[in-house]
Amino acid sequence: MTDDDREKADDSTKGDADPAKTDDEPPAGWSLWNDEPRGRRILVFRPDVFNEGNDLPAECIPTILVSNRSRAKRPGASQIPTDTWHVVLTLEPDVEAVVEDYESREAAVAGANELARRFAAGDVDYRAAYQLPREDYLDRLDSVVEA
């Protein structure tokens, strides 16, 4: 490859990205709650409606956690880093609707944003995550997701 070829290749990749939007930004309806450099990232869905003033309790806010920490259920395990990045959608503290694994943080962040888009579009079956029926709550959640 000549120097001219290299310059053309470099120039062809410039200007493709929209400077106003980055791949790291969460999709509509989701807010970035925490983003540690090279570490955990937390997205929350519609914090404007999951609060004390509404009929959707704050502890039930749909949350997506990106982390490379161990998912083992023993004390202190969550402090141990792993080589695998996890994207976990929780609907309340002990209700996980989706768990996905990735090889890098960058892939996990992109996967989390895609999961957030699928959730907001109604393409995640969160009802299946519940062992005990909570029909009134889930009907109300449906109305927020569909809004």
Image (tube, rainbow, N blue to C red):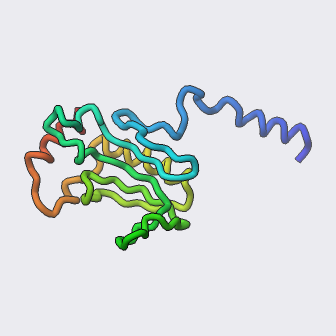
Examine the rendered structure and indicate whether residue 22 appears above or below residue 122: above
Q: Which residue is depicted at the point 46% across and 48% down? A: 41
Which corner quadrant of the image does residue 9 belong to?
top right
Examine the rendered structure and indicate whether residue 20 appears above or below residue 87: above
Q: Position of residue 34 (x, y in %)?
A: 45, 43
11 or 104: nearer the eye? 104
Q: Which residue is depicted at the point 27% across and 31% down? A: 48
Q: Position of residue 7 (x, y in %)?
A: 84, 36
Examine the rendered structure and indicate whether residue 99 appears above or below residue 64: below
| Outermost residue toward the front in this view | 76
Q: Which residue is depicted at the point 23% across and 34% down? A: 49
Q: Position of residue 58 (x, y in %)?
A: 23, 42
| 131 displayed left or right of 126 | left
| 30 displayed left or right of 24 | left
10 or 104: nearer the eye? 104
Q: Which residue is depicted at the point 57% across and 51% down? A: 38
Query: In the rendered picture of this protein, how many numbered marks are placed on residues?
Result: 0
Which quarter of the figure is the C terminus placed in? top left
| Outermost residue toward the top in this view | 20
| 19 displayed left or right of 58 | right
Q: Position of residue 130 (x, y in %)?
A: 18, 59
